Image (spheres, grey):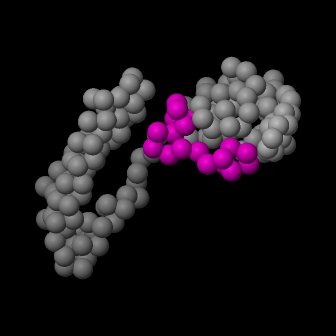
């Protein structure tokens, strides 16, 4: 996820302080990985330097000055361009799991045990996500569905690989 573009998008609804941006980001996108304040302010500093935001006002109170940021026309254009570009699908062609299976075969270990352990871990995570999906709002349901679909695809790969372990062993460890 592009933190900068996400913060810019949040600014399209109106100027905000860094604290407000962090809070809104965490509510909408940061359930599993909330932003650190330092990341918000360093990102806003970079966006300011690049002309994508401007300081809309500064408030001073009992603590440090609070800058209120507003998105510029260049920032709006940047967000629109980012939203219009499709994300590159990640084919996972260099999977750590595949590497473990091959190394198990090369070292005389049971690659089936590697696959079984991974299958158990995938199923455990699927149970957690299914429970979260059941209790969550629509946004949480969609995020969980995305992760569950990826885990289901991984499980299909685990089954296919388990069925082909004999042939794979012949290829990688002749």
Report the residue at 60% width, 35% height from top. 23
Residue 149, given in percent of the width and then of the height, sits at 31, 36
Report if residue 28 lies within the magenta region: yes
User: Which of the image's four quarters has the N terminus?
Assistant: top right
Residue 39 located left or right of residue 144:
right
- Residue 154 position within the rendered picture, expressed as x and y whole percent measured from the top left: 28, 47
Residue 65 seen in render? yes
* Residue 9 spot, x, y in % from top left: 66, 27
Give above or below for 117 relative to 40. below
Residue sitting at the far top: 13
Instruction: Kindly identify the residue that appears in the image at 68 percent across and 37 percent down.
Output: 19
Q: Residue at x 50, y 46 (%)?
A: 33
Which region is colored magenta? Answer: 25-42
| Towards the viewer: 78 or 21 | 21
Residue 26 is left or right of residue 134, and the answer is right
**At 16% across and 71% down in the image, what residue appears?**
110
The correct choice, above or below, for 42 with respect to 51 in the image is: below
In this rendered view, identify the residue nearer to me: 108 or 21. 21
Q: Nearer the viewer, residue 57 or 159?
A: 57
Count of marks, rendered view: 0
Is residue 66 a member of the stretch shown in magenta?
no
Q: Nearer the viewer, residue 103 or 123?
A: 123
| 56 is higher (above) or lower (below) than 36 | above
* Residue 51 can be seen, yes or no: no
């Amino acid at each position: 996820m592009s933190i900068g573009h996400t913060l810019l998008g949040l600014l399209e609804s109106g100027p905000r302080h860094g604290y407000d941006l962090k809070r809104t980001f965490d509510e909408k996108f940061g359930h599993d990985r909330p932003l650190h304040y330092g990341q918000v302010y360093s990102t806003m500093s970079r966006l300011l330097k690049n002309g994508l935001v401007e300081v809309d006002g500064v408030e001073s109170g009992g603590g440090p000055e609070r800058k209120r940021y507003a998105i510029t026309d260049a920032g709006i254009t940047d967000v629109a361009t980012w939203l219009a570009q499709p994300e590159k699908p990640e084919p996972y062609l260099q999977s750590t799991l595949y590497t473990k299976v091959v190394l198990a075969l090369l070292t005389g270990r049971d690659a089936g045990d590697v696959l079984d352990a991974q299958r158990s871990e995938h199923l455990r995570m699927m149970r957690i996500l299914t429970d979260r999906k059941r209790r969550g709002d629509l946004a949480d349901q969609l995020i969980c569905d995305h992760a569950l679909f990826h885990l289901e695809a991984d499980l299909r790969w685990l089954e296919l690989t388990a069925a082909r372990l004999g042939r794979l062993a012949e290829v990688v460890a002749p």
